[in-house]
Image (tube, rainbow, N blue to C red):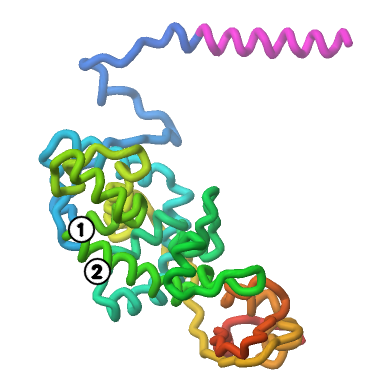
């Protein structure tokens, strides 16, 4: 007990000493800022220059407005200095953008909407929100079913990246038609068409950047644009990596199934993979079997040979 008290006393003196030294440091002044002595291995945080020509889907972000400038600056700073998350997004984008980009193009939805998926799920195919939204595009159960997705304990097609992207495209195109701009359509993906329409009418404006909105929807477009900017200019924002550091896009081929599958572990072995790999590429299969009493035609993705080292 005496030894413990002595240790605590020493720790207390060290802490007090540290506090005393800190209290004796002078606050920076206009005369000293920028002239501080550089420390070895010092970590530096820099203010960011506002990029020129910021836009979402070709629609200008009016950063000449001081309010818009501050909100845009906040998201650039937050996402630049959340380095671990940022680097993971670079890595995942290499893996998943090749899947969703052609679907956006096919549906006539601007390529910038892939960054909406980035902020919705962090490019995690199995992401789940506290409200129950799921998958790459964070689709709610009712919305998914309204748009033809099967959702139950056995199959949840919100986790099917291709099918979910098609649903997102359908929603966004309808929102653009109703609200008049891609920026408002993106905001409506977060707050709903009716919610955005009501706010526009109540406040007597026609543009997202003129709306007073809640915290989440008010930051929504700025977060998308910030990540678009950062992911397109990694070195500018201090992200350093080689192409070999990024996660690989694994090409697949499709196998059609119109019967029940009693054991997906055995099913996977027929294609030279295991159950884990089958689930990685088909997270919409929620159980180890497929009921399929209705004899529905499902398409299962199987990775091409040579990408996984599977032990027999």
Residue farthest to the right, as pictured: 1
Q: Is residue 134 visible?
A: yes
The span picked out in magenta is 1-20
Residue farthest to the left, as pictured: 64
**Residue neighbourhood size for the residue with mark 1, other residues' Cα within 10 Å, grouped as few (<14), some (14–19), many (≥20):** many
- Residue marked by disc 2: 110
Residue 126 image offset from top left, x and y in percent:
56, 63
Q: Nearer the viewer, residue 154 or 165?
A: 154
The residue that appears at 26% across and 14% down in the rendered structure is 29
The residue that appears at 28% across and 47% down in the rendered structure is 222
- Quarter of the view holding residue 308: bottom right
Q: Is residue 235 visible?
A: no
Q: Is residue 123 inside the magenta stretch? A: no
In the picture provided, is 90 more to the left or to the right than 227?
Answer: right
**Residue neighbourhood size for the residue with mark 2, other residues' Cα within 10 Å, grouped as few (<14), some (14–19), many (≥20):** some
CA gap, disc 2 and disc 1: 16 Å
Relative to 101, does residue 203 appear above or below in the rendering? above
Quick check: marks 2 and 1 in contact, CB under 8 Å?
no
Residue 95 image offset from top left, x and y in percent:
46, 71
């Amino acid at each position: 007990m005496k030894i413990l008290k002595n240790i605590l006393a020493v720790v207390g003196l060290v802490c007090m000493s540290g506090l005393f030294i800190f209290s004796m440091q002078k606050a920076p002044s206009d005369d000293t800022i920028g002239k501080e002595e550089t420390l070895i291995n010092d970590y530096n945080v820099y203010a960011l220059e506002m990029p020129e020509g910021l836009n979402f889907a070709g629609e200008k972000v009016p950063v000449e407005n001081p309010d818009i400038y501050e909100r845009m600056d906040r998201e650039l700073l937050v996402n630049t200095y959340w380095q671990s998350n940022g680097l993971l997004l670079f890595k995942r984008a290499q893996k998943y953008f090749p899947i969703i980009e052609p679907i956006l193009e096919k549906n006539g939805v601007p390529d910038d909407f892939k960054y909406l998926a980035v902020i919705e799920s962090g490019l995690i195919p199995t992401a789940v929100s506290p409200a129950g939204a799921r998958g790459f595009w964070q689709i709610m159960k009712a919305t998914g079913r309204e748009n033809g997705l099967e959702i139950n304990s056995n199959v949840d097609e919100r986790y099917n990246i291709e099918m979910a992207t098609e649903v997102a495209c359908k929603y966004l195109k309808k929102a653009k038609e109703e609200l008049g701009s891609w920026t408002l359509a993106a905001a409506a993906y977060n707050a709903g068409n009716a919610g955005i329409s009501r706010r526009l009418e109540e406040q007597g404006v026609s543009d997202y950047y003129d709306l007073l909105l809640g915290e989440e929807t008010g930051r929504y477009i700025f977060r998308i644009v910030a990540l678009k900017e950062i992911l397109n200019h990694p070195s500018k924002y201090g992200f350093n990596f080689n192409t070999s550091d990024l996660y690989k896009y694994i090409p697949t081929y499709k196998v059609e199934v119109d019967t029940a599958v009693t054991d997906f572990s055995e099913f996977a072995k027929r294609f030279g993979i295991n159950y884990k790999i089958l689930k990685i590429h088909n997270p919409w299969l929620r159980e180890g079997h497929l009921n399929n009493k209705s004899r529905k035609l499902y398409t299962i993705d199987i990775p091409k040979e040579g990408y996984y080292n599977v032990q027999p």
